[in-house]
Amino acid sequence: GAAVASLGELLVEFVCTEKDGHNRRATAYVGPFPSGAPGIFIDQAARVGARAIFAGAVGSDAFGTVLTDRLGAVGVSDALIRVVDGVPTGSAFVAYNSDGSRDFVFNIAHSAAARLPGAGEAIAAFIAHGTGVFHISGSSLGDAAMRETALAVARGLAEAGVAISFDPNIRKELLGDPGYFAAVAALTALSTYVLPSEEDAAVLFPGEAFEAYADRLIAAGAESVVLKRGAAGCLGRDRAGATVERPAHRVEVVDPTGAGDCFCATYVGLRTLGLPFAASVARANAAGALAVGRLGPMEGNSDRPALERLLEPGS
Ligand code: ADP
């Protein structure tokens, strides 16, 4: 079948195991976990059975090996994963607050994370790999160089007939940067699959009902729009005009990081494998629930049988 491709920041992540940790006192951190929103995405796409390829970069250090080993273990092609000498692998430290918010400390700017292969090289290799869908996470649009690469790759692949998938994953602190917002708007308009969260939708389609903006995007060329609603599940609409609503599976929330990426990867991976719209939405919703139940950004990723076990017959 066709492959799923993505690109962006590869990071290792350390998770503070005490609430309200970073700003208090030294506490226990666990890690390094393989992470980075696009890394979580491509791991999950491979785990549901899609062929997968990723463009990214790590340092030539032990943290880089954590990432390349994990992606290799699930079968992601490393043809476009660069190992860069002289800079460390990107990393992030996360602490969860009692109110449910998260505090991140990022070490990305001077790391290997943004040193992706060039757009031309990536486009050629993605096409040679038989890419059917190219996914972008909005988290990769904060860095100006990575944003340019992501846009150029998306435009080049769209021109070559590859479907584009976009998770806006909007970072409010970047909305003042006109280049950032222009990139988010351009990718939304270019996409076959538009996969916003509630927070994204509030920024991109303020005051508009789901069906209204979904139909507008579909009329402009999208195949489907699926809204991620956290503990409220999800809402999807496709070209056929049917709205599919799924309540969330009841799970204990251990670590919400990665649920959205996991949801998107399951949806996009299964559509690429030929599953119908509603069946893909149901499995994405199950993957999101499983993701919040495990500590670690991609430790809650799940393979196809685990998703099937969570669904009622006929889903
Ligand atoms: P993001 O991580 O992009 O903010 P969400 O928080 O909306 O996205 O989570 C993505 C999906 O994961 C949701 O649509 C839902 O299917 C699932 N999910 C998220 N939080 C929960 C939860 N507390 N219980 C069950 N499922 C959840």
Image (cartoon, rainbow, N blue to C red):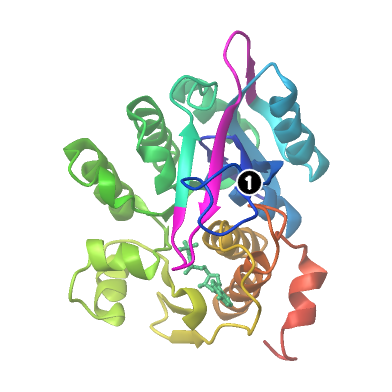
Looking at the image, which is closer to me, 291 or 284?
291
In this view, the residue farthest toward the top is: 86
The image shows residue 29 at horizontal and vertical percentages of 66, 44
- Circle 1: is it few (<14), some (14-19), or many (20+) Cα within 10 Å? few
Q: Is residue 262 above or below residue 6?
A: below
Location of the C terminus (image quadrant):
bottom right
Q: Is residue 185 left or right of residue 67?
A: left
Q: Quadrant of residue 197?
A: bottom left
Q: Is residue 69 above or below residue 163?
A: above
What residue is drawn where x is 42% and y is 53%? 166
Query: Residue at label 1?
Result: 27
Q: Is residue 72 left or right of residue 202?
A: right
Q: Which residues are magenta?
A: 81-102
Describe the element under mark 1 as helix, strand or loop: loop
Q: Is residue 187 left or right of residue 15?
A: left
Q: Quadrant of residue 300?
A: bottom right
Q: Is residue 1 visible?
A: no
In this view, the residue farthest toward the front is: 25
Residue type (three-letter) at the residue carrying disc 1: Thr
Q: Is residue 286 visible?
A: yes
In this view, the residue farthest toward the bottom is: 313
The image shows residue 121 at horizontal and vertical percentages of 52, 21
